Image (cartoon, rainbow, N blue to C red):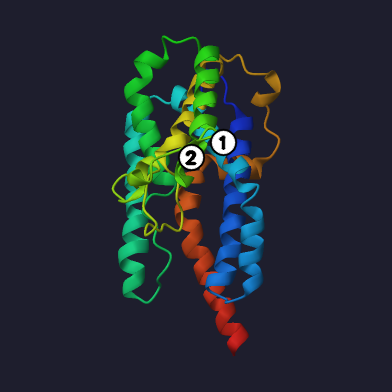
Amino acid sequence: MMTDKKRIYALDELRGFAILCMIVHHSFLDVGDVLGLSWGYKVFDALCLVQPFFWAIFIVISGICSRLSRNTLKRGFIVLACGLVITLVTAVIMPLVGFDGAEIYFGILHCLGCCMIITGILMPIIEKIDYRIGAVISLLLFFFTYGINSKTMLFGLIHLPEGWYQYNFLAPLGVFSASFESADYFSIIPWIFMFLFGAFLGKPAKEEKFPQGMYKKRSKFLCLVGKNSLWIYLLHQPVIYVIMLITAIIINV
């Protein structure tokens, strides 16, 4: 998130805050899964109401950074590869040692990696579009397609054909059958449009035209988390599982 002169610390802090919110949310699911405490599921479900807000922050910031990155395509393939590693661990390795139900087939890293790759390919076109027009159109497309996972669009006013939802090979795009399950799931549609919204906002960021307050560091901790969000996301679930398992052993002793 560097321009030639200034780092936009507010983006680091916001991304750090968003990733911490995601980790807290996931932790309550583990309280239910690993410790067998039903209140964990209740808190997890309650937080699902606000969690999309933090997802949006994280994805918009990633979109902004795609405009500041020297090589968005390369970063996209790296992030997608990390997502595939998570799939390997959760869908292949963990079931072998007795942990089922945590399979992640297309989570946040898969989605972000694909969004980066798509944006990197489209960047020459994106740069020719007035960023204000592009941002507005992207936001409208996000809200228009937001219900695709539940077979609707335009806030439920448009119902999509049931025949589209008979197979799972289109799950990365948001179309899947009732048999599809992924412990963490972010489809390219609608989130690509939120990512593009950020990419268009990246133009004034690249030109150092963001409000001056965004260039000031307020929290070293949040900045640290934001700068290392990829590694923190990759490692948080194993760490939480270990903590929960140790807690479960202590409780049962």
| Image point (42%, 36%), residue name | 189
Asked whether residue 71 appears in the rendered view, the answer is no
Q: Nearer the viewer, residue 204 or 192?
A: 192
Horizontal and vertical percent position of residue 105: 36, 54
- Residue labelled with disc 2: 152
For residue 94, above or below residue 1: below
The residue at 63%/73% (across/down) is 38
Left or right? Give the position of 135 relative to 42: left
Q: Position of residue 134 (x, y in %)?
A: 49, 16
Q: Pointer 1 and pointer 2: residues touching (CB < 8 Å)?
A: yes
Q: Amino acid at mark 2?
A: Thr
User: Which residue lies at the image location 47% right of the left edge and 64% below the top edge?
Assistant: 238
Badge 1, how many Cα within 10 Å: few under 14, some, many 20+? few
The local crowd at label 2, few if under 14, some if 14 to 19, many if 20 or more residues have their Cα within 10 Å, is some
Name the mark on residue 155: 1
Vertical comparison of 243 with 227: above or below: below
Task: Give the left or right position of residue 140, taking residue 75 as reference.
Answer: right
- Amino acid type, mark 1: Phe
